[in-house]
Image (cartoon, grey):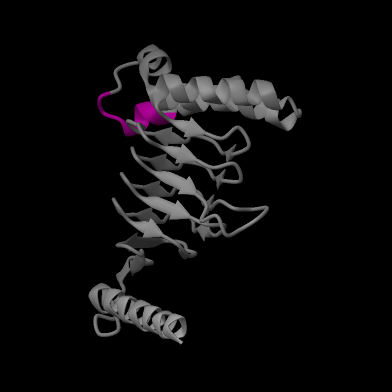
Amino acid sequence: MFKRIIEDVNAVRERDPAARNFWEVFFLYPGVKAIRMHRIAHFYYKHNLMFLARFVSQRAARITGIEIHPGATIGKRLVIDHGTGVVIGETTEIGDDVLIYQGVTLGGTGKDTGKRHPTIGNNVMISAGAKVLGPFKIGDNSRVAAGAVVLEEVPPNSTVVGVPARVVRQDGKRVALDQIHIPDPVKQKMDSLESRIIELEALLKEKKQ
């Protein structure tokens, strides 16, 4: 565990030009503190000490603003930069050398049981405010743009953007987007309202009869 913590600190120092020395990062960086406390909480979780696991994880959330469920599996050298508002669900799996920015959610949709949260591959970057929701994988070396909402699997070496997220680059090559068949949100809303009106009119007719 201590070796992992040292790796986590050194990973921040390599990625953050504002990090001046080891002890500053170790004691003062909320992302490092959250990961350090998670590794302790996860140890308790694996040994079925659920109350202690939850106690540590909730204390970490209060101190850092970063909520990591004690059941989440985190690999080596995870960096949570800034970190406020980050939420990581119970069945999330995170590989090595992952970079996560503030406001990211690695969560579920509420539709799944068992494995409910995403699996994040190695060397993945998830930018500020992105939401990755569901039990699928983000492939190795991929990038999730700020504010993206990812609802399905992302191939390795890809960049995804948008709501819902779409692959715009893969294996270093730009991917052409289908601009013709993009759903029209206004039309979808109008269709929904029209269907509701028809339904209500049918109910009124039944009551009159």
If the image is split into quadrants, where does the N terminus sit?
Answer: top right
The relative height of residue 161 versus residue 43 in the rendered view (above or below) is below
Q: Nearer the viewer, residue 197 or 179?
A: 197
Exactly how many numbered labels are in the figure?
Answer: 0
* Quadrant of the image occupied by residue 9: top left
Magenta stretch: residue 198 in it? no
Vertical order, 177 against 133 (above or below) = below
Residue 157, position as x, y percentages in the image: 42, 61
Residue depicted at 59% across the width and 53% down the height: 116
Q: Identify the residue at horizontal 56%, vertical 27% (top origin).
A: 38
Left or right position of 57 against 102: right
Residue 105: x and y in percent read 43, 45
Q: Which residues are magenta?
A: 11-18
Please, is residue 187 above or below residue 24 in the view? Answer: below
Q: Nearer the viewer, residue 133 or 196?
A: 196
Q: Position of residue 13 (x, y in %)?
A: 36, 26
In the image, 135 versus 205, the foreground residue is 205
Residue 13 lies left or right of residue 42; in this view the side is left
Magenta segment main secondary structure: helix
Instruction: Locate residue 140, reporting x and y percent.
Output: 48, 55
Task: Answer with left or right where residue 73 lies relative to residue 7.
Answer: right
Residue 6 is at least partly visible in this image: no
Picture quadrant where residue 150 is located: bottom left
Residue found at x 29% / y 74%: 189
Q: In the shown orientation, is residue 180 left or right of residue 137?
A: left
Q: Is residue 57 visible?
A: yes
The residue depicted at 41 percent of the width and 23 percent of the height is 64
Q: Is residue 13 magenta?
A: yes
